């Protein structure tokens, strides 16, 4: 059995350091699947004519689908593989529409780190930007994560 | 063709007023579907033994799946049917795990409203709480929405 490398422990996160994920092209089927799992069937995401009349040119992805894909790309990057204890919270701005065919990639910067009262874990805040294939930042914000320490100190 | 009633316009949102959505029971298949569409295959959401060892007792839902379901319940409530111009951003805390079989419901309170520079729209901030079947708040935060005005003033 192949052992996966562990991700970063709390002590490994250096403020200001950046990481990039791979990319993912969003398909129409992803929007349909997200409408189903979320239950959000707003016609902005399903009806080209309605979305065009609303000024978007055609159907757009749910904002939270972009966020979901960002979390997936980060997970696949393996930064906190086996070391993530909890996703505590986030702030997030939906800046530009994401459309079927757009390719998203994520860049994170370690914004801050702070110790927890418990010696086996710490809190890491990542500044997160999701960009499309033109380099435009379509969504951005901060993720607050609870991450294992390598050893109690 | 049945015409759906329009949702609330900017002028209709009164600070402090609350609204409740219906409920939705989260199934194991929802977690599997969300792992697929997000690309987040963290074993906390797929592997009962791993999630138990991490202290969760068994596999838990992705945090962002809970958020996605909250947006879906709100959409189904129809509050901003036909009047929502954009989801601008959010703040969100993941407070308690959500497990397969949990039933989520959402309560929103109009936290604040403010006019936009453009006379045909305004900004509405909703304080949002997602509760499970025991009444515990599992996730909460604020959604900032751009909503149509009934008429320009």
Image (cartoon, coloured by chain):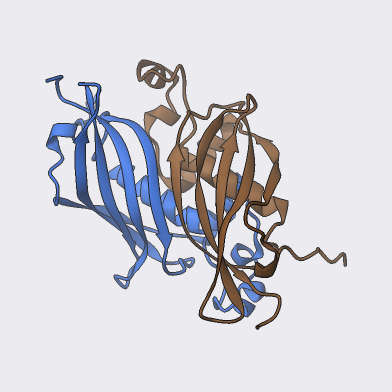
Chain colours: A blue, B brown
| Residue B62 appearing in the image | yes
What quarter of the picture does the N terminus of chain A occupy? top left
Depicted B63 relative to depicted A109: above or below? above
Residue sitting at x 32%, y 71%: A136
Residue at the image point whose x is 64% and y is 79% from the top: A53
Residue at figure coordinates x 38%, y 29% from the top left: B43
Report which quarter residue B2 is drawn in: bottom right
Q: Position of residue B91 (x, y in %)?
A: 44, 50
Q: Relative to residue A5, is residue A111 depicted above or below?
A: below
Residue drawn at 37 percent across, 37 percent down: A87
In the picture provided, is B126 more to the left or to the right than A22? right
Question: Which residue is most to the right?
Answer: B1
Q: Nearer the viewer, residue B39 or A52?
A: A52
Image position, residue B85 (x, y; %): 59, 70
Q: Quadrant of residue A20?
A: bottom left
Q: Nearer the viewer, residue A32 or B21?
A: B21
Q: Is residue A9 visible?
A: no
Left or right position of B48 against A121:
right
Q: Quadrant of the C terminus of chain A?
A: top left
- B35 relative to B89, above or below: above
* B63 relative position to A148: left or right: right
Q: Position of residue B138 (x, y in %)?
A: 52, 33
Vertical placement of A37 versus A23: above or below? above
**Residue A58 spot, x, y in % from top left:** 57, 74
Quadrant of the rendered image containing residue A103: bottom left
Left or right of B87 in this view: B149 = right
Q: Looking at the image, how many numbered discs can be counted on the residues?
A: 0
């Amino acid at each position: 059995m192949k052992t996966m490398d562990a991700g970063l422990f709390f002590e490994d996160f250096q403020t200001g350091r950046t990481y990039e994920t791979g990319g993912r092209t969003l398909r129409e089927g992803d929007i349909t699947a997200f409408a189903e799992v979320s239950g959000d069937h707003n016609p902005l995401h399903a009806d080209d004519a309605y979305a065009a009349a609303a000024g978007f040119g055609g159907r757009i992805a749910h904002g939270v689908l972009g966020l979901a894909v960002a979390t997936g790309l980060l997970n696949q990057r393996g930064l906190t593989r086996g070391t993530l204890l909890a996703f505590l919270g986030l702030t997030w701005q939906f800046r530009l529409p994401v459309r079927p065919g757009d390719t998203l990639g994520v860049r994170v910067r370690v914004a801050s780190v702070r110790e927890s009262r418990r010696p086996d874990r710490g809190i890491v805040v990542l500044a997160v930007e999701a960009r499309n294939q033109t380099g435009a930042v379509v969504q951005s914000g901060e993720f607050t994560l609870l991450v294992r320490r390598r050893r109690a100190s």
